[in-house]
Image (cartoon, coloured by chain):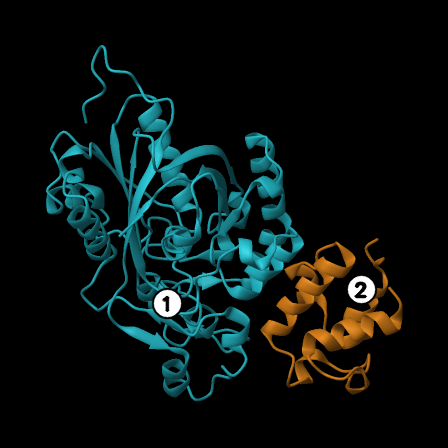
Chain colours: A cyan, B orange
């Protein structure tokens, strides 16, 4: 990483220039889950979640493999960008190793300059908003000229096959976004972040880290009162608590972001929410009086892909976004952690 | 909200006719009452009563009557 040298003007704003994505090849449909688990009643679940299928990483395929694919696609389309990247941000809760930093491995694998800063950050559903916020800060402070932000997640590896509550929701994916100081992309505007760690226990993998290291006891399977089987090393989610958190916190987050941007809801053409599930997103949108056509959903074929949902939805729906439109990205979930930002849309290249 | 309004709300959440529900029924005995029923009820409460039904409250309910009593203690949103 080379800070701007004397005489260079530091950009006043940072711009999201391009988004590429990568989805694992294997697809698991609701019918596949039903066939594998004849005792599950999945008849109504697809209608409620809005999810019919999800992509699942292969046994030897890691989040960084998916991130590598997404970034490689970005550089195929924009070959000149590879040499200019001077900061790599890797957002994941599925690192390759406890150490070293996955972003360091990706710097080498992607052939990025050794003058490049590289950092992992562990965030889930708020991760993309965090990534844009960090990239913006690096660029407007003159610390970086071109930031590659990769989101990559393989929650499927953390899910017990007999835990319906999470298995029907989550899918694996990665995205790569390029953020620079060159005007023309989507300008990253007002951002609001928030945290409430008192909700941590409602969405977590309890064991396998420093607090509760892996041992025989943490590998023991238990079945809860709802018939969900998992171990302490698997993902646990209390859906009611997460829904309650969303109802209480996210309308406030949207209002606070509008206030910081000095906008009204009508000034924002598109609301891109974290894609948790259709039921929750529809309720949230209705509560905020946002019509369906201004809140694109992209869930049916990919499911909830954690930090990837916002860039995947931008990638999916961005063809309808016009220069001059304002877009609000709203992320919320595991932590609890939440964040929203306004993008002033121009032309973002979707790879 | 009134008893009739509360019963209609619960019936909507569990996708049953109000006549199929009675206060003394144990929720765990109602086959159609799933985890999705609770999420739907949370959503309806948020929408119609402008308040939140918490996960803690849900855990304290054992009969349909418990849910109805909680709903009846709340006023409909203006």
Q: Nearer the viewer, residue A33 or A216?
A: A33
Q: Which of the 4 image quadrants contains residue B47? A: bottom right
Q: Secondary structure at mark 2?
A: helix
| Relative depth, front residue between A14 and B38 | A14
Q: Chain of mark 2?
A: B
In the rendered image, the quadrant that contains the N terminus of chain A is top left
Picture residue at 37% right of the left edge, 67% below the top: A159
Q: Nearer the viewer, residue B25 or B1?
A: B1
Decide: few, some or many residues near mark 1? Use Cα within 10 Å; few <14, some 14-19, many ≥20.
many
Where is residue A333? Give x, y as percent.
49, 51
Expressed as whole percent of the image width and height from the top left, the position of residue A25 reads 24, 69
Residues beneath discs 1 and 2 located on the same chain = no
Q: Which residue is mark 2?
A: B70
Task: Judge left or right: residue A330 versus residue A180.
Answer: right
Q: Chain of mark 1?
A: A
Q: Position of residue B45 (x, y in %)?
A: 73, 62
Query: Which numbered circle lies on residue A159?
Result: 1
Indicate whether A296 appears above or below A162.
above
Q: Is residue A319 visible?
A: yes
Q: Position of residue A167 (x, y in %)?
A: 41, 71
Where is residue B6, by image quadrant? bottom right
Residue B63 in view (yes/no): no
Residue at the (15%, 38%) spot, across then down: A80
Residue drawn where x is 23% and y is 53% of the image? A70
Q: Is residue A320 left or right of residue A183?
A: right
Q: Nearer the viewer, residue A280 or A218?
A: A280
């Amino acid at each position: 990483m080379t800070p701007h040298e004397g005489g260079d003007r530091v950009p006043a704003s940072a711009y999201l220039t391009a988004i590429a994505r990568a989805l694992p090849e294997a697809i698991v449909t609701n019918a596949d889950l039903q066939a594998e688990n004849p005792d599950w009643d999945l008849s109504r679940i697809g209608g409620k979640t809005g999810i019919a299928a999800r992509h699942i990483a292969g046994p030897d395929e890691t989040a960084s493999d998916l991130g590598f694919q997404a970034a490689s696609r970005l550089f195929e389309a924009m070959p000149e960008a590879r040499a200019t990247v001077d900061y790599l941000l890797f957002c994941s809760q599925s690192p390759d190793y406890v150490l070293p930093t996955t972003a360091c491995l990706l710097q080498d694998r992607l052939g990025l300059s050794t003058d490049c800063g590289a950092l992992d950050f562990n965030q889930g559903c708020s991760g993309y908003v965090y990534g844009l916020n960090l990239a913006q800060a690096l660029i407007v402070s003159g610390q970086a000229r071109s930031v590659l932000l990769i989101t990559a997640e393989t929650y499927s590896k953390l899910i017990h096959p007999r835990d319906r509550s999470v298995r029907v929701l989550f899918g694996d994916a990665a995205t790569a976004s390029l953020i620079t100081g060159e005007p023309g992309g989507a300008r990253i505007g007002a951002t609001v972040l928030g945290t409430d760690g008192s909700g941590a226990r409602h969405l977590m993998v309890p064991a396998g880290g420093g607090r509760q290291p892996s041992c025989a006891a943490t590998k023991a399977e238990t079945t809860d009162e709802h018939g969900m089987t998992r171990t302490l090393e698997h993902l646990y989610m209390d859906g009611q608590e997460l829904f309650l958190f969303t109802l209480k916190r996210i309308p406030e987050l949207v209002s606070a972001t509008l206030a910081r941007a000095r906008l009204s809801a009508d000034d924002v053409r598109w609301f891109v929410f974290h894609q948790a599930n259709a039921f929750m997103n529809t309720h949230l949108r209705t509560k905020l009086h946002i019509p369906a056509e201004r809140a694109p959903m992209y869930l049916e074929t990919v499911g909830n892909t954690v930090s990837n949902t916002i860039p995947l939805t931008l990638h999916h729906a961005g063809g309808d976004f016009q220069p001059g439109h304002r877009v609000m990205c709203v992320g919320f979930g595991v932590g609890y952690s939440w964040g929203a930002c306004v993008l002033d849309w121009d032309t973002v290249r979707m790879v | 909200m009134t008893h009739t309004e509360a019963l209609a709300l619960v019936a909507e959440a569990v996708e049953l006719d109000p006549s199929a529900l009675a206060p003394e029924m144990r929720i765990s005995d109602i086959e159609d009452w799933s985890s999705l029923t609770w999420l739907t009820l949370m959503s309806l409460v948020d929408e119609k009563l402008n308040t939140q039904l918490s996960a803690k409250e849900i855990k304290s309910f054992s009969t349909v009557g418990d849910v109805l009593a909680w709903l009846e203690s709340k006023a409909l949103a203006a």
